[in-house]
Image (spheres, grey):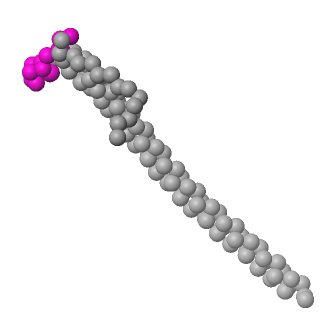
């Protein structure tokens, strides 16, 4: 090969390397932008889920409080006496039944 052909080949490889480097930078920037968008989307989703979790925790606390109010002995007794016409059993109203271990056939 003569000197001029060697320079052309050398220049060709320089241009090729420059093109590869330029394309690589562009591709890396594009990939970085995609990852940044994915990160932002996931961060937003996490914020929404944390907010939803807080609301559910508060609702759960409220429901537990409602359960304790609704199952209080005073409330149940009031409903039994006022709405259902029930009364506390007197000692003579109570019948005791003893069970023996024998089975009848």
Q: Residue furthest top?
A: 91
| In the rendered image, the vertical position of residue 55 relative to residue 65, given as above or below | below
Q: Which residues are magenta?
A: 79-91
Q: Position of residue 104 (x, y in %)?
A: 35, 36
Query: Closest to the observer: 8 or 94?
Result: 94
Residue 88 shown in magenta: yes
Q: Quadrant of the C terminus?
A: top left
What's the residue at 14%, 16% (across, down)? 87
Q: Is residue 35 left or right of residue 67?
A: right
Q: Quadrant of the N terminus?
A: bottom right
Q: Residue furthest bottom?
A: 1
Q: Residue furthest front?
A: 105
Q: Quadrant of residue 75?
A: top left
| In the rendered image, the vertical position of residue 64 relative to residue 36, given as above or below | above
Residue 84 shown in magenta: yes
Q: Is residue 62 visible?
A: no
| In the rendered image, the vertical position of residue 95 relative to residue 37, given as above or below | above
Q: Quadrant of residue 35?
A: bottom right
């Amino acid at each position: 090969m003569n000197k001029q052909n060697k320079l052309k080949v050398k220049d060709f490889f320089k241009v090729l390397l420059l093109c590869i480097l330029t394309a690589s930078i562009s591709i890396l920037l594009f990939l970085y932008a995609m990852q940044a968008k994915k990160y932002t989307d996931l961060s937003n989703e996490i914020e929404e889920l944390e907010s939803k979790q807080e609301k559910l925790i508060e609702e759960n606390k409220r429901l537990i409080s409602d359960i304790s109010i609704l199952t209080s002995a005073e409330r149940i007794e009031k409903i039994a006496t006022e709405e259902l016409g029930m009364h506390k059993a007197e000692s003579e109203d109570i019948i005791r039944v003893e069970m023996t271990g024998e089975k009848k056939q």
